[in-house]
Image (spheres, rainbow, N blue to C red):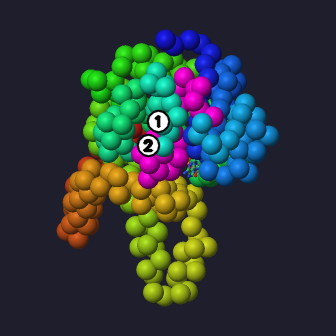
């Protein structure tokens, strides 16, 4: 059923939806955009993100594939409304950062649903944050189930390749466990780092620390100092995986504390050496 150029719908024209629109249009697809605000629809047309835009989901009735790019909490409510406008042949996917709860419910609502997660973003949000080539050489995870129609998987694989992203397949559960380690835990660790620094009671020292903070603090505090709504969504929707990761992290932190309390510099160095080697397995 898939072909090189299609009518593609995007529901939720923000950073991810808008960036998808820019790239899909540049690959020759006809892009139909639906967003909540009329002003966003107009900006999407003016910025060349979509060919047509509306606040009315009926615009998507002719789309062969629809990407739901709303905030996480709105994906299922949006899908419920959307499917009343679609023929059964339309492939629907989402871009939500958590997969198990969404894929489970979405699949029960729409047979032709396939979960997805482009692992790309910036610190900005909204239609004006949309940029070209956001997904190039970044992981794009698809989480099909045994019941997902093969044609839906194929069409999404083709789109992901066109975006220049690196395609991965896994179960929704494995996705959520993996992102809990490398995406959701870092947000919580980073935000608690900022809280800890702010607990300095001497105003003179606190001010000095703020003045002296440089690249190390910038790197380690970046994800914890970002959009609060995203952090809450991660915790709410990926709660059990995140709690497991946080508890393991607390254990490792306790271990470091005890090495330092006991002046066990050998054990501390061994741990730091292990991690110096392990880091590249995640970053390269
Ligand atoms: P965003 O920039 O805030 O965009 C979301 C857009 O959804 C808003 O611009 C808003 O458009 C629209 N919207 C809100 N409620 C709507 C509704 N009821 N119906 C239709 N449109 C609605 O957020 P984002 O960063 O693109 O995130 C969107 C999704 O991508 C989330 O599910 C997130 O988990 C996922 N994701 C995010 C990242 C990231 O790093 N940011 C990475 C990967 C995946 P209006 O202007 O019309 O209100």
The reply to whether the residue tagged 1 has its Cβ within 8 angstroms of ligand 1 is no
**Mark 1 sits on what residue?**
83
Q: Quadrant of residue 263?
A: bottom left
Is residue 61 within the magenta segment? yes
Residue 169's x, y, as percent?
A: 36, 26
Q: Residue at x 71, y 44 (%)?
A: 41
Q: Quadrant of residue 3?
A: top right
Real-space Cα separation, disc 1 to disc 2, in angstroms: 6 Å
Depicted 238 relative to depicted 2: above or below? below
Name the foreground residue: 138 vs 279: 138
Residue 30's x, y, as percent?
A: 67, 24
Q: Quadrant of residue 137?
A: top right
**Quadrant placement of the C terminus:** top left
Query: Around disc 1, counting alpha carbons within 10 Å, would you say few (fewer than 14), some (14 to 19), or many (20 or more)?
Result: some
Residue 107's x, y, as percent?
A: 34, 34
Horizontal side of residue 173 vs 69, given as left or right: left
Name the foreground residue: 105 vs 245: 105
Horizontal side of residue 146 vs 279, given as left or right: left
Horizontal side of residue 246 vs 156, given as left or right: left
Q: Residue at x 30, y 27 (%)?
A: 145
Tell me the magenta residue range: 59-79
The reply to whether the residue tagged 2 has its Cβ within 8 angstroms of ligand 1 is no
Query: Around disc 2, counting alpha carbons within 10 Å, would you say few (fewer than 14), some (14 to 19), or many (20 or more)?
Result: some
* SS category of the residue bearing label 2: helix
Cβ atoms under marks 1 and 2 closer than 8 Å: yes
- What's the mark number on residue 161? none
Is residue 47 within the magenta segment? no
Name the foreground residue: 124 vs 263: 124
- What's the mark number on residue 80? 2
* SS category of the residue bearing label 1: helix
């Amino acid at each position: 059923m898939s072909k090189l150029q299609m009518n593609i719908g995007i529901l939720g024209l923000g950073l991810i939806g808008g960036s998808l629109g820019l790239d899909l249009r540049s690959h020759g697809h006809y892009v139909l955009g639906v967003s909540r605000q009329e002003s966003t629809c107009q900006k999407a047309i003016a910025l060349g993100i979509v060919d047509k835009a509306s606040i009315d989901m009926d615009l998507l009735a002719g789309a062969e594939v629809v990407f739901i790019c709303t905030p996480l909490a709105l994906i299922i409510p949006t899908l419920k409304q959307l499917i009343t406008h679609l023929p059964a042949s339309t492939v629907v996917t989402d871009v939500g950062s958590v997969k198990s709860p969404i894929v489970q419910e979405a699949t029960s609502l729409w047979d032709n649903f396939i979960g997805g997660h482009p692992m790309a973003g910036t610190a900005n949000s909204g239609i004006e944050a949309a940029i070209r080539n956001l997904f190039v050489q970044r992981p794009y995870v698809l989480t099909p189930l045994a019941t997902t129609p093969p044609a839906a998987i194929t069409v999404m694989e083709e789109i992901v390749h066109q975006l220049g992203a690196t395609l991965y397949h896994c179960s929704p559960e494995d996705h959520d466990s993996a992102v809990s380690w490398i995406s959701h835990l870092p947000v919580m660790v980073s935000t608690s780092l900022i809280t800890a620094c702010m607990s300095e009671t001497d105003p003179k020292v606190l001010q000095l620390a703020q003045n002296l903070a440089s690249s190390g603090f910038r790197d380690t505090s970046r994800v914890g100092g970002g959009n609060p709504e995203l952090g809450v969504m991660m915790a709410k929707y990926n709660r059990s995986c995140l709690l497991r990761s946080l508890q393991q992290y607390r254990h490792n932190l306790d271990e470091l504390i005890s090495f330092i309390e006991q002046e066990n510099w050998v054990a501390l160095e061994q741990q730091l050496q292990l991690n110096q080697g392990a880091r590249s397995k995640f970053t390269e």
